[in-house]
Image: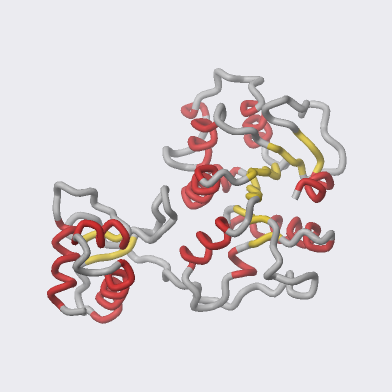
Amino acid sequence: MSECDFDKILSVLSDTNQKPWMTAHTIAKKIKGSVGVDQVERLLLNHMDTAEYPKIRYSSLPSKKTLRVLWGALERVKDRQLQNLTKDYIADDSLDDIGELGEHCAFFSHSHKDYDAVIDIAKNLAIKGKMPWLAETHIDKNEGINSKIIEAIESNKNFILYLSKNALNSKWTSKEFSYAHDNDQRVFVIVDLSCSQVRDFVTTMQGENENLHRRAWDYKAGNLFETLIALNKDFKLFTFLNVDEIPGNFQSADRCPVKSLSELVSEL
């Protein structure tokens, strides 16, 4: 690998006829085999770590199609402070004493802002022998976040989504869901009943209010809200409420059956 190889990469990312963001896989294809995918990724990371004035940066969001890291040339994308691509803190040990972390049965997608609620649900599932995979508990310090999330989704046939206002506003959660949907995962949604907008959203997904549009909600384009609405007709949504009994206003529908959280254990 040489400075010449990096110049080839930079030339691809700087080409205004190409998309501003690309994964290392796409860049390697554009270079047409002269530099492999792993080499491209190492060159990009090395440049970010060693250059006094970096010419490239990675995106804060992954590729929607593959969840891989996206890269761009600074002359085409704005510079900004970013979190590390690797986890910079020790994994939460909340599930360690309950079961084997390696024997997980579902990927648990959620907004990091909801972690307190999510870890409580995860503990209840783990106690009943259904260990979920969470980024906070299953990714160790210094491990690559994107690669571990991709591996976890692909290794589980079940995908649990904690549906909250925070999640509906999350682009990361949207991309995780889209990736799971594209890979034919079984989707289970646990609903945060504390938010009236989320309760209304579930009603919308059940087809009770088909005229509800995004502009009536406080959500931006590209977030989970819009992704779920767009895919509403294309998949069956299994909804579980974090309660033991189903409230009367949540009636089960063929396309969107509603069950209590306790019933999720038998489904996984």
In the rendered image, which quarter contains the N terminus? bottom left
Instruction: Name the outermost residue toward the bottom.
Output: 50
What residue is drawn where x is 69% and y is 63%? 104
**Which image quadrant for residue 184?**
top right
Residue occupying the point 31% across, 67% down: 37
Q: Residue 55 appears at what percent x and percent y? A: 19, 68
Where's residue 8, x and y in %?
15, 66
Left of 260 or right of it: where is 6? left
- The answer to whether residue 241 is above or below residue 104 is above
Q: Is residue 174 left or right of residue 114?
A: left
What is the residue that sits farthest to the right in this orientation? Answer: 245
Task: Tell me where residue 253 appears, x and y as whole percent.
Answer: 73, 25
Whole-percent x, y for residue 210 in the image: 58, 19
Q: Residue at horizontal 25%, vertical 62%?
A: 28
Residue 51, above or below 65: below
Q: Residue at x 42, y 53 (%)?
A: 66
Q: How is the image coloured?
A: secondary structure
In front of the other: 166 or 257: 257
Image side of residue 217 versus residue 119, left or right: left
Q: Is residue 98 left or right of residue 31?
A: right
Examine the rendered structure and indicate whether residue 66 appears above or below residue 148. Answer: above
Tag count: 0
